[in-house]
Amino acid sequence: MISEALLREENVYNIALRVDPNSAMRAAAFQLIRNVLHACGTVIALRPEDNLAAASVEIVEASLSSKHPLEHISHRCQIPAVVSEIRIEQAEQAAAPEHELLGDLLEAQAAKISARNVESVESGAPNQPGSSAVATVTEGSLRVDAQRIDAVMNLVGELIIGKSMLNRTLTEFDVHHARDPIRVKLAEALAFQSRVLDELHKCVLKIRMVPVEQLFRRFPRVVRDIAKLCGKDVALEVSGEHTDLDKGILDALSEPLTHLVRNAVDHGIEPADERVSAGKPARGTISLNAHHQGTQVVIEIRDDGRGIDLELIRQHAIRNGLIKAEDAARLPDQDVMNLIFEPGFSTAAEVTEVSGRGVGMDVVRTVLDRLKGSVYIASSKGKGTSIQLRVPLTLASIQTLLFRVGGRLFAVPLSAVVEITRIQDQEIHQVDKREVLRLREQILTLVRLNELNRIHPVQSPNAKKTKNFVVVIGLAEKRFGLVVDSLVGEEELVIKALPGEIVSSDLVSGASILGDGTVVLILNVPAILSRLSRSLPLGAIA
């Protein structure tokens, strides 16, 4: 991948970051470093690979391909109270060794042979070379009902809660019997149990993982049928089909992804004569790509069509009463683009079999919110549109940051935390009836959970504090700050879905139970951001 990045004329950097030895939350520090690296470019390699291994590591190493200069990378990596030392070297252009080229050829040849063998087995030709090997693999497979795997995952989740209970009990034992020799034996037994449980958890997660190729395989026919219906010539390019994703999430993405592909053919790709007159090939191209990014999977739908007409969206939004005419002019382009996700929004001139009903894009956002994911659109008029769906690898458990607001215990995914800072009251300003904070060169909208709808404090607030903790949350290109009373720490939580009659707020996506029986509410970050975006004005959202 380094050679490919160099061929694309991107800068490749080898980076070493020393974690501040005074940092009390190593996994959170590692997550912040990883978020910064992903924001700077494409992470080719990263060591350590996960939060669990990062708990005892002093130096984080990475290879990064980026179009940004070295000074920009160095500036972004200077995270206060997290990184104490930075060393960055730029990789030089080097010709690919002959053995690498030979390896590429051998891999391509092996892929062709493997595909031929699978076809021969499916066609019932057992005497062809290689068919016995495929048959052996098939015999070694076992079909298991998905509900059984879910039951095992639920039991593993209960074991994780039990591990948390034992850890808390051992902490209490330390307070009263610090010198007791049994304490050492208990700690060793608990450490052994934790290692085995972590491996069991990883194994069960891998069982639930399936390649996105199971979802992608249906789209060549979808594109062909819709293109024929619309009288267009459209080609589909697929890559990253071997990227693994949780089976439940993959099934849930089927409908929104189908809507996006249909829209790309119907709205995105122009008719052949229009493309030729614009200097484009007569055949339009739609690309489907999937890849891992940290603890998330990114699925991208890209087309080389006409792009999104922002002025047309503004006019339809004003006509439908979504925004006022005076607000439309000062609405940022990205927020105008996000209006297409509002229920009933459609720019189609007439209702057809393919589009014009005003449903589809709102379904996309609803499903992504439910999956604790996000959707991000980038478009250039006349050049095309790119839509990214970002979803977690699995919904079973997540690494979280715990904090208290109004006496309640809340959690947010560590993958969404950009940084944590402490501010004085005088640093908070009012802009358009919103509290904002100037953090370095960025203006952040501040959110107080106890002031949002249907989230009430369980304790009466004390005298107003002069210092506040602010957890900066990042989602796609958006940022906002959560004002919290106190930080509790980081912990792996097993997510439990809650019935609607227990939690009526859409800002809470689930809950979990700590070892001492305390219930933690897990915030729905995309829903909070959506709530902010829909309440004008939006100028203060960074």
Image: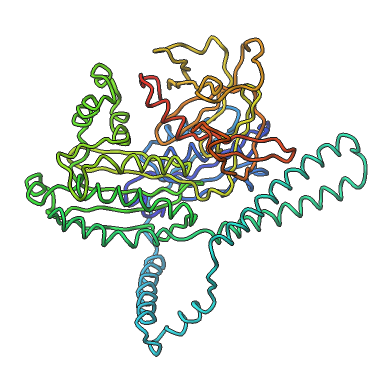
Left or right: residue 47 compared with residue 488: left
Q: How is the image coloured?
A: rainbow
Q: What residue is at 20 percent from the left and 44 percent from the top? A: 267
At which x and y percent is residue 264? 24, 48
At which x and y percent is residue 203? 61, 60
Q: What residue is at 40 percent from the left and 63 percent from the top? A: 97
Q: Quadrant of residue 529?
A: top left
Closer-to-camera residue (187/248):
248
* Identity of the residue furthest to the bottom in this view: 127
Q: Quadrant of the C terminus?
A: top left
Closer-to-camera residue (434/103):
434
At which x and y percent is residue 173? 86, 39
Left or right: residue 302 compared with residue 250: left
* Identity of the residue furthest to the front in this view: 501
Closer-to-camera residue (252/358):
358
Q: What residue is at 25 percent from the left and 47 percent from the top? A: 263
Picture layout, residue 123 above or below residue 33: below
- In this figure, what is the number of numbered marks? 0
Q: Quadrant of the N terminus?
A: bottom left
At which x and y percent is residue 323? 28, 23
Q: What residue is at 63 percent from the left and 43 percent from the top? A: 492
